[in-house]
């Protein structure tokens, strides 16, 4: 299947201007595979500048088993900037919200530069999954 690329942000709705404006921003998502390693790993997820993160989740395909069984999500200089201690001890979908991570202020706006998402697990193990970050592009809040 082909793909289409827009520079964005993308807004959708039937009334663009006036009192009845009903357009809204389209939520974007990027995903990358993650594994349970005792070092940070860089993903292919790059969030555009000024974006608002609205959801971070991990589809755990193999349960983490290192004892800590958690995953942190952030940037290279702060590996738990967005998620601190996502519990990945059970296979399935683990959904994080800003309120459950205690890092909600960091989700509001990623800043004036694009950010590359990294992850870290505090111990080596057999865990694996697919990390997904959903965001609204260029909200500039």
Image (cartoon, helix red, strand yellow):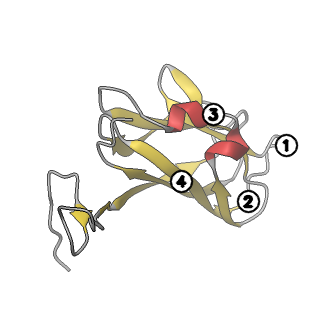
The residue at the point 26 percent across, 65 percent down is 21
Label 3 SS? loop
- Quote the CA–CA distance across marks 2 and 4: 21 Å
In the image, farthest residue toward the top? 77
Residue under label 1, please give it. 67
Residue 103: mark: 3
Task: Categorize mark 4 by other alpha carbons within 10 Å: few (<14), some (14-19), many (20+).
Answer: some
Q: Secondary structure at mark 1?
A: loop
Instruction: Identify the residue shown where x is 51% and y is 38%.
Output: 107
- In the picture shown, does residue 67 fall above or below 106? below
| Image marks 2 and 4: residues in contact by CB distance under 8 Å | no
| Residue 112 as seen in the image, left or right of residue 67 | left
- Label disc, if present, on residue 55 of the rendered structure: 4
Question: Gap in Å between the C-alphas at discs 1 and 3?
Answer: 24 Å
Give the distance between the C-alpha atoms of the residues marked 1 and 2, in whole angstroms. 11 Å
Vertical placement of residue 20 versus 119, above or below: below
Instruction: Give how far across and how far down residue 58 sits, in percent.
Output: 59, 57
User: In this figure, which residue is indicated by the disc labeled 2?
Assistant: 63
């Amino acid at each position: 299947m082909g793909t289409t690329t827009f520079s964005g942000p993308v807004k959708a709705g039937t009334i663009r201007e006036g009192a009845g404006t009903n357009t809204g921003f389209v939520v974007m998502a990027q995903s990358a595979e993650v594994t349970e390693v005792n070092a940070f790993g860089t993903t292919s997820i790059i969030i555009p500048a000024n974006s608002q993160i609205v959801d971070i989740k991990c589809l755990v395909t193999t349960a983490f088993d290192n004892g800590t069984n958690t995953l942190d999500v952030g940037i290279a200089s702060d590996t738990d900037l967005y998620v601190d201690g996502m519990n990945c001890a059970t296979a399935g979908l683990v959904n994080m919200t800003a309120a459950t991570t205690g890092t909600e202020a960091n989700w509001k706006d990623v800043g004036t530069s694009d950010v590359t998402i990294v992850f870290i697990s505090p111990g080596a193990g057999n865990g694996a999954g697919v990390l997904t970050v959903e965001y609204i592009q260029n909200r500039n809040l």
